[in-house]
Amino acid sequence: MSLVTHDPKYRRIWMWPRNKRRIPSWAIANMLSIVKVQTSSETIVSGNIELQNIMTKAMESSGLKKAGEQYHPNPGGMRTYLSQLEGLGLIFYRPDRSLWFTLAGEDIVSGKPPLPILQTMILKYQYPSVYSMGAQVRINPSLKIKPYLFLLKLLMDPDIGYLTNKEIAIPVIYGHNNSCYALCKEKILLLRSGEEFENIIDSTSEDLYTPRGSSLQNIFDIANTFKNVLQSFCFIYTEKNGRIEQAYLNEELIPEIKKALKNENKFISMNGTEEWFQRTFGAWNRKDLRQLTKTQYTSRSELEKNIIAGHFASYCGTRLVTEVDDEFIDKMVESYGFDRQFIRDTASRLLSRSYSMFEERFIELSRSGDPRMALEFEKAVTTIFRDVLYFDAVETGQKKNYSSVGGYSDVFAVASDGIHCAIIDAKASPKYDLGSADWYKMKDNYIANYMDLAEGRPLELEFCSYVAGGFKGNIASKLRQLSEATGVGASAISASQLIRLAQKNPIPENQPTIREVFCKNKILTAEDFI
């Protein structure tokens, strides 16, 4: 199979809804809650402008969309947001244009962690699809490709390593099927060798064609959108090389990507109905055997709970929430006039999912390299050790040392037994390697000075640990050497694995076991714990 022949009825260029550049998983969860509220009975959504306007206002109220904001010049309002949910395999329409949830959509609405679900959907996303065949998209049905998986495969290629926005534009144009991999790779390497982008386009009139016109800027915008989707769902992170932004693979997800690549040539057939395709696509971890019927009536309290759930998802998406505070309650009372205790009770039942909503932001902070975001990262790490892992944890990274040489680690944590303690260093880096300067700083300063933070208590230092966005190099060997040199357990854990540990909702009685794991001289995963 090679490049698809040009047909003026269709586009061969990839496409994805461009209502928002970034779509974090908590925002998807909020959107689905809004849709759930507005479609709780037999409601026709498609073409129902009044209902779509109500949903748009609800999104504005929840902070998902600024009042009057339209990213794209002709976005179609709420229709474009619904297209995004449809493209992700979260909703589908029946012939009467009533809206329904797939298993993936229903699981997110019911409170399951959205990020793993959305990562699975992105890896499965394919052309042709219900979205790609839509009247407003019209991608040639002969294209047979999983575009996001194709980009991730390129990033795994040692000859590629990273992708710039212009380089992503090449598979956007020429990624018609998996047989086009060599062609796309060749053109990317040509671009890196100094060739002008226009010179690697075989036919401007055909290769850039869409039924609505063509332009290079449009292609670059589409490429940027695909990059942002991968970044939103934590598949990639970006670094600046001068003025050029380069996207790198999140190596923690390589096992999931390799698993998906085993099925890169398996596609859902378009021969069935729209409902069959979307339900098959949306069956992210099991078969969809549901007999779907909608209730004719949803109680007011259930509708109010869905509204609160949507707002709480947004609230948790930007900060680590461990309790329902007055700020959130005041906002809901001001916006909707709901009873304060009803808000507190409803949101309290959702607290267990707050870590899932914060996951992307936490990972973003951990990979930022920005000093301002690094402080926010340190604060979040402290909060997890204090409120989730039950340590008496305080931030100490900014504390001045007036009694001895050197400073202190970012976090000092006293165990619940009041006897043991730990020091944690938060590193806002996607590729932390525990260089010699940091190794000696931990050995000669942080560990040597820990009693300065004990406030007179005869505490026993049990372990030190590093939390970072990601690691590179032989960290495990350095951790073992650090432990041998100090007699203290030394470990490291990535931000994504620490937040996954938080999602397990450990109980206070688990802390001794958790401490034992942190004493292991290696890079830890959530599976190492309870």
Image (cartoon, rainbow, N blue to C red):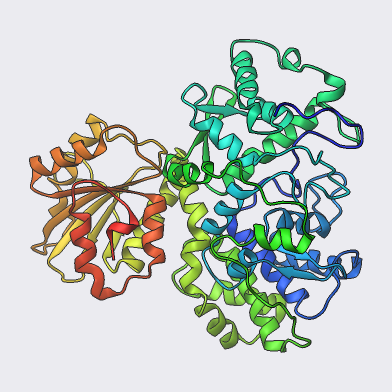
Residue 303 spot, x, y in % from top left? 70, 82
Quadrant (top left, top right, bottom left, bottom right) of the C terminus = bottom left
Up the image or down, 321 lies above or below 252; here it is below
Up the image or down, 288 lies above or below 24; here it is below
User: Residue at 35% of width from left, 68% of height from top?
Assistant: 387
Q: Is residue 265 left or right of residue 425?
A: right
Residue 384 spot, x, y in % from top left? 36, 62
Q: Is residue 289 left or right of residue 465?
A: right
Quadrant (top left, top right, bottom left, bottom right) of the N terminus = top right
Residue 145 spot, x, y in % from top left? 67, 39
Between 204 and 517, the one lying in front of the other is 204
Residue 176 spot, x, y in % from top left? 71, 32
Residue 415 visible from this viewpoint: no
Number of marks present in the image shown: 0
Q: Quadrant of residue 96?
A: bottom right
Between 402 and 21, the one lying in front of the other is 21
Between 338 and 221, the one lying in front of the other is 221
User: Residue at 67% of width from left, 70% of height from top?
Assistant: 33
Residue 9 visible from this viewpoint: yes
Between 161 and 53, the one lying in front of the other is 161
User: Residue at 81% of width from left, 45% of height from top?
Assistant: 72
Q: Quadrant of residue 206?
A: top right
Up the image or down, 131 lies above or below 358; here it is above
Q: Is residue 294 left or right of residue 150?
A: right
